[in-house]
């Protein structure tokens, strides 16, 4: 890693979805990026709110930061993105990995979306390719393709840190599920090895934490800690062992509470469906599909 300048990383935790949002900058008054924002959603009423996103906005404004890129590590199935709201309030460009087109094609079928729904990623401002870099002020991020949890997952390398999305969790929690459409346990293992090939002191920033009751929520670990103690994929676990474990484990997991609204909103970059004749927007609930 050859950082231009040390990164200043601020984490925000959304307790409803156990999600971390990150603002990365090089200090007060500098350009910044936001990674994995959250739009609050109440599934009982179908109402959204901006509590979590407003905390991010307040911080950016207080630090006089310039929002340059609004990044997703993948199309989340457990929370709605607040990316368009952040863009409306602060500017910046919406970014995701270029393989989002594969996810869009799959879920266009799942939700029976009409021809107005484009599957070329054009709802985003920029699609990142593996190895591509984006500059923001004195800092730069590099995109690392890490499929497996979904076919479109990206990790982002900034300074001495990797923002790994759902690919890895804290060592006592393990790894991401692979049973969503396009997911694959063998591919995930290979992606994890790509991350764990970095120097052991490399910091890994989580998208979520689901901690055991004996510890508080945490958002950062290291390559060394994951290799030594990750309960699913520590040193010595073979690819075959991991695939068998992950496949068996995934058969016992329930679908995330917010998967249906999340996917529909997130695959078009957080933009809601077009309003119908009455001026209201609606989401679909497919029956007996997922």
Image (spheres, rainbow, N blue to C red):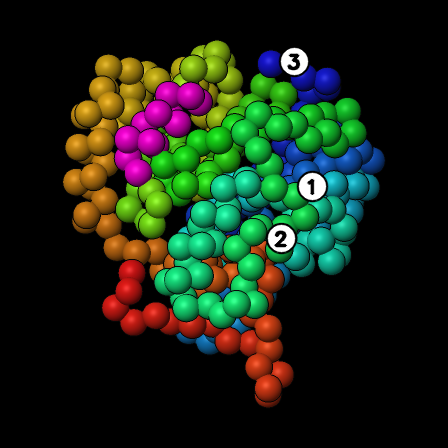
Task: Name the residue located 44 percent from the left edge and 50 percent from the top edge.
Answer: 103
Magenta part mainly helix, strand or loop? helix
Judging by the rendered image, the residue that carries numbered circle 3 is 2
Q: Position of residue 131 (x, y in %)?
A: 57, 25
Specify the label residue 286 is tagged with: none
Q: Helix or strand or loop: what does disc 1 sit on?
A: strand
Task: Name the residue located 74 percent from the left edge and 46 percent from the top edge.
Answer: 92
Question: In this rendering, would 77 be left or right of 63?
Answer: left
Query: Of 223 and 69, which appears nearest the observer?
Result: 69
Dot 1 surroundings within 10 Å: few (below 14), some, or many (20 or more)? many
Task: Name the residue located 49 percent from the left edge and 26 percent from the top edge.
Answer: 204
Q: Helix or strand or loop: what does disc 2 sit on?
A: loop
Judging by the rendered image, the residue that carries numbered circle 2 is 122
Residue 59 appears in the picture as rendered: no
Q: Which residues are magenta?
A: 184-195
Question: In this rendering, would 248 be left or right of 14?
Answer: left
Q: Earlier in the sequence, mark 1 or mark 2?
A: 1
Q: Helix or strand or loop: what does disc 3 sit on?
A: loop
Judging by the rendered image, the residue that carries numbered circle 1 is 69
Q: Position of residue 240 (x, y in %)?
A: 19, 25
Quarter of the image that includes the C terminus: bottom left
Quarter residue 224 falls in: top left
Q: In this picture, is 152 found above or below 198?
A: below
Question: In this rendering, would 230 be left or right of 77?
Answer: left
The answer for how far apart the CA atoms under marks 1 and 2 are is 16 Å
Q: Earlier in the sequence, mark 3 or mark 2?
A: 3
Q: In this picture, is 255 found above or below 278?
A: above
Q: Position of residue 88 (x, y in %)?
A: 73, 58
Q: Earlier in the sequence, mark 3 or mark 1?
A: 3
Quarter residue 110 falls in: bottom left
């Amino acid at each position: 890693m050859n950082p231009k300048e040390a990164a200043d990383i601020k984490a925000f935790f959304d307790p409803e979805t156990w999600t971390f949002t990150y603002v990365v900058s090089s200090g007060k008054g500098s350009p910044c990026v936001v990674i994995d924002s959250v739009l609050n959603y109440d599934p009982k009423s179908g109402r959204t709110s901006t509590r979590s996103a407003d905390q991010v906005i307040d911080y950016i404004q207080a630090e006089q930061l310039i929002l340059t890129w609004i990044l997703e590590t993948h199309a989340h199935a457990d929370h709605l993105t607040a990316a368009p709201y952040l863009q409306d309030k602060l500017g910046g460009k919406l970014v995701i990995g270029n393989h989002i087109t594969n996810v869009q094609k799959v879920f266009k079928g799942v939700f029976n979306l009409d021809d107005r729904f484009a599957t070329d990623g054009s709802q985003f401002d920029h699609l990142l390719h593996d190895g591509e870099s984006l500059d923001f002020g004195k800092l730069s991020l590099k995109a690392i393709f890490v499929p497996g949890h979904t076919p479109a997952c990206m990790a982002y390398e900034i300074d001495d840190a990797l923002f790994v999305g759902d690919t890895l969790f804290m060592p006592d929690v393990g790894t991401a599920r692979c049973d969503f459409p396009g997911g694959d346990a063998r591919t995930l293992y290979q992606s994890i090895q790509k991350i764990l090939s970095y120097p052991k002191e490399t910091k890994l920033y989580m998208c979520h934490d689901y901690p055991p009751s004996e510890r508080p929520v945490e958002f950062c670990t290291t390559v060394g800690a994951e290799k030594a103690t990750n309960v699913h994929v520590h040193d010595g676990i073979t690819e075959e062992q991991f695939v068998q474990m992950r496949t068996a484990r995934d058969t016992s997991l329930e679908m995330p509470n917010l998967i249906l609204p999340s996917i529909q909103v997130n695959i078009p970059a957080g933009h809601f469906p077009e309003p119908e004749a009455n001026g209201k927007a609606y989401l679909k609930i497919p029956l007996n599909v997922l």
